[in-house]
Image (tube, rainbow, N blue to C red):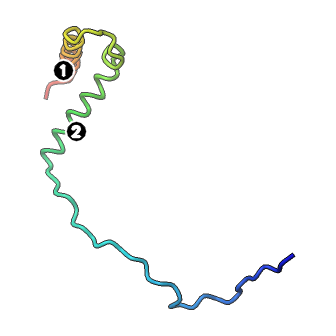
Amino acid sequence: MRPIAVDLRAPRPGGQPPTARSPRRPPPAFDRVLYRDRNVVERCFARLKQLRAIATRFDKLADRYRAGVLLASLILRLREPTR
């Protein structure tokens, strides 16, 4: 059996090479109106997906599926309180 060589000395402060860092990039532009509109659309899709016929695409014909989406959208719109 060979003995295992273990270095028990403490590492020197300057012993490790510095890690390479990528230069910082400025954050992407933030448009509050665009973000708000996108959020409205994403919430609408989330509500539509709660309806099983829409989420599973129960209707195989495109016209019937589109009619179901329009009907579900209308129902969701009418359920919302007025502003």
Seen from this angle, which residue lies furthest front?
Answer: 1
Q: Residue at x 20, y 58 (%)?
A: 28
Cα–Cα gap, marks 2 and 1: 16 Å
Residue type at numbered disc 1: Arg
Q: Is residue 31 above or below residue 15?
A: above
Q: Residue at x 30, y 29 (%)?
A: 46
Residue 57: x %, y % from top left: 32, 15
Q: Is label 2 or label 1 in front?
A: 2
Q: Residues within 10 Å of mark 1 (few under 14, many from 20)?
A: few
Asked which quadrant contains residue 43, the reply is top left
Residue 66: x %, y % from top left: 20, 14
Asked which quadrant contains residue 30, the reply is bottom left
Q: Residue at x 82, y 80 (%)?
A: 3
Q: Which is more N-terminal, label 1 or label 2? A: 2
Quadrant in which the C terminus is drawn:
top left
Residue 10: x %, y % from top left: 64, 89
**Residue marked by disc 1:** 77
Quadrant in which the N terminus is drawn:
bottom right
Q: Is residue 30 above or below residue 2?
A: above
Element carrying mark 1:
helix
Judging depth in this view, the residue of 12 and 52 nearest the camera is 12
**Residue marked by disc 2:** 39
Q: Is residue 51 above or below residue 8?
A: above
Give yes or no for contact between labels 2 and 1 (Cβ–Cβ under 8 Å). no
Q: Residue at x 34, y 11 (%)?
A: 58
Residue type at numbered disc 2: Asn
Asked which quadrant contains residue 35, the reply is top left
